[in-house]
Amino acid sequence: MESGGAVKEVPLVRVEPPGPKALQVLEEDREFLMQSFVRWYPLVVEKAKGSLVWDVDGNVYIDLNSALAVANVGHTHPRVVDAIKKQAEKFLHFSLTDFYYKEAVDAARDLVGISPFDSAKVFFANSGAESIEGSLKVARGFFQGKRTYIIGFLGAFHGRTMGALSITSSKPVQRRWFSPLVPNIIHVPYPYPYRCPFKSETPEECGEAVLGYIEEWILGKIVDPSEVAAFIFEPIQGEGGYIVPPDNFFRGLRKLADKHGILLIDDEVQAGMGRTGRWFAIEHWGITPDIIAVAKGIAGGLPLGAIIGSSDVMTLPGGSHASTFGGNPVSLAAMREVINIIKEERLLERASRLGEEVIKFFNDMYEETEIIGDVRGKGFMIGVELVKDRKTKEPAKKELATLINRCFKRGVLVIGAGLSVLRIAPPLSIPEEHLWRALEIVGDEIRRLDKEVRA
């Protein structure tokens, strides 16, 4: 595990970012790259190790977002780097869609071993979006075209390729201009306890209301259940706001799906690979989906995605789905080492323990301030929702942007989700010294912002 170093004793940021070298990169970025993405702040990375990131001007930052929930075992973990080097010296590529190699079989066996399935098979892709695309095909293919509808949830983010985008519903800008999208997609509300779309007094009532809406209004009035191939969901909505559903929801959804012979597709792209203190977040609710899509934290930073599904569901015929680079041997070597590190360094237990402490930290701040409306999460997937007023729950959008940028200028990398939610998702291996130094800065800035809002 990464050593603490001298982070506590030294200033993190010495040159006001963006510094002169960063400004040059920003100018060239605008000239040569299509600007179809939006950066949180002008961080120009030069190197990263463990939970620390250095920019091109020599500033040091503590990473509380794991480079978008990818660096679950920390940046450039030496064991992952060594595994990459060893495989790179053997062979870099030999398309798994046309030939065989043992590395893919061994990696699939490892993934099946940590999955909740009794018997499972794996398909390797290159990214989260590809894993979602493939999962949709597996579900429709399982029914041989007899069931074509997919039911997804409002607020979800599943990717930006056309099939994944058709399920995504977190921001209008992600879908604007790209219609028509894939047909036969139906979106329903997600049980968001803090902002339940239905009148409810408790989180459990919110969960029951959503389930009732699906059965009575969607399956009862819009589409016959015999035409629905799958429900697709994020067990904890990521970009939608780090939303943790009520405990009764997934048990009810599994029961509803079983009643009508509908499959469950679990999007673990962000929540999986130990992020919540379990290998897969859905394990917190004691149900087993039919298909799991993973990516992000799976390979320590190399491009890799995977579909893990029950053996009786993963039945697409030869030639119906493939990927030239899916299951790249170098990425697979990194993935296998990530799994070993999580096991041997007991990072699941660590994320659970420290995650509870971080949630307590923010719950204490909830009592101290008025700008925090809700604190939620599991493991190291924690959302802190900011509001202008607790009674109206008006999202504090501008305040969140201010908070994120102030933390950046003080050496802490955090990002947002939903309308006004601060994401806390550090590497599972972050030294406690780094974690609490970063949270001290975040806490200072929340208090400062709270005073400004109240003034």
Image (spheres, grey):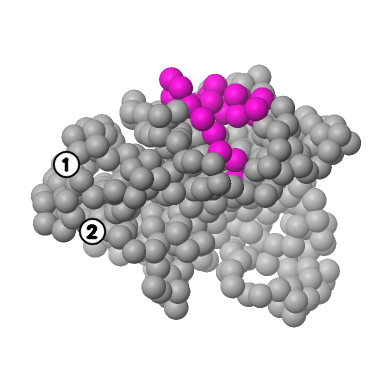
Task: Give the side of residue 308 with respect to residue 126, left or right.
Answer: left
* Relative horizontal placement of residue 361, taking residue 259 as reference (left or right): right
Task: Specify the label residue 230 is tagged with.
Answer: none
Q: Residue at x 34, y 64 (%)?
A: 183
With 113 as the anchor, is 154 left or right in this view?
Answer: left
Does residue 415 show up? yes
Q: For the residue marked with disc 1, what is the amino acid?
A: Glu
Residue placed under numbered mark 2 in the picture: 391
Q: Position of residue 171 (x, y in %)?
A: 41, 66
Which one is nearer the viewer's eye here, 453 or 56? 56
Q: CA distance from mark 2 to mark 1?
A: 24 Å
- Determine which residue is flagged by label 1: 208
Which residue is drawn at the image coordinates 50% and 34% (left, top)?
308
Answer yes or no: is residue 14 visible. Answer: no
Confirm whether the magenta stretch covers residue 134: no
Residue at the (16%, 41%) spot, across then down: 208
402 versus 109 height, above or below: below
- The answer to which of 63 and 83 lies nearer the viewer is 83
The amino acid type found where label 2 is placed reads Lys
Q: Which residues are magenta?
A: 105-125
Q: Residue furthest right?
A: 89
Q: Secondary structure at mark 2?
A: loop
- What residue appears at the point 63 percent right and 59 percent down from the top-left corner? 408
Judge depth for marks 2 and 1 and give the one in front.
Answer: 1
Q: Position of residue 398 (x, y in %)?
A: 45, 69
Going by the image, does 135 lie left or right of 228? right
Please provide percent x and percent y for residue 109.
60, 24
Question: Residue 250: where, in percent of width, then height?
Answer: 28, 36
Quadrant housing the N terminus: top right
Q: Is residue 411 above or below residue 280?
A: below
Residue 115 inside the magenta-drawn segment: yes
| Residue 21, placed above or below residue 355 | below
